[in-house]
Amino acid sequence: MRDQTRQRRSPILCVLLAIASIQMGSAVAKGLFDQISPLGVACLRISLGAILMVGLTRPRWRHYRWSDYRLLVGLGLAMGVMSTLLYSALAYIPLGVAVTLEFMGPLGLALYHARRWRDTLWGAMAIAGVILLNPLDVGGFHPLGMGLALAAGGCWAAYILLSARVGQVFEGTTGVTLAMGLGRSPCCRWG
């Protein structure tokens, strides 16, 4: 019984740690905008992440098909463009607003794949919460920043779909690690 409880807690703990890491990283990144442009910060964050992941996991990149590598390019682009768009949005709107709007991508994906009415109801309630947090009257928020955050959410949805496919093809963290290395390219080219 304890093993089952432990197995259920482990993914929840991982999600909470990932959320904390992403939010803290975004807060630190926004603090760097005085010294580095938002695009430069996106480049720096993805590059450091790629170096860390390659150092920790030592991915094997050979013995895959060309179609598998195309998946990696797609995932890398989704990662890089998502970071670039989010950090660009942070130059115009507050962090909380940007992250809330970005969450619309995964939420929309979850609603699209909802099979039960309860799942749809919870998704609709989440959307209502986002609307209440971010009034439709955007007088206080820059429309460009809001659009960039929503576009980042679209990239997040693409990231979710592509990472699932990459995870089926590449073993362990190999696919995500290699894609992260590719994802730094769009950020650094524009930054």
Image: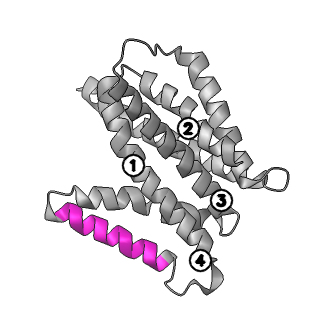
Counting every numbered tag in the picture gives 4
Of callouts 1 and 2, the N-terminal one: 1
Placement of 56 over or under 109, stated as above or below: above
Number of other residues with Cα within 10 Å of mark 2, as a class: few under 14, some 14 to 19, many 20 or more: many
What range of the chain is rendered magenta? Answer: 118-132
Nearer to us in this view, 180 or 30: 180
**Quick check: can you spot residue 100?**
no
Question: Which residue position is annotated with label 3?
Answer: 88
Of callouts 4 and 3, the N-terminal one: 3
> Would residue 165 appear left or right of 150 to someone viewing this image?
left
Look at 53% across and 87% down and name the residue there. 137
Placement of 108 over or under 14, stated as above or below: below
Of labels 2 and 4, the one closer to you: 2
Number of other residues with Cα within 10 Å of mark 1, as a class: few under 14, some 14 to 19, many 20 or more: many
x then y, percent, for residue 113: 22, 55
- Spatial separation of the CA atoms under disc 4 and disc 1: 23 Å
Quadrant assignment for the N terminus: top left
Whether residue 176 appears in magenta in the rendering, the answer is no
Looking at the rendered structure, which numbered label has been put on residue 183?
2
x then y, percent, for residue 32: 79, 50
| Callout 3: SS | helix
Tell me the amino acid under the disc marked 4. Answer: Pro
- Spatial separation of the CA atoms under disc 3 and disc 1: 19 Å
Question: Which residue position is annotated with label 4?
Answer: 143
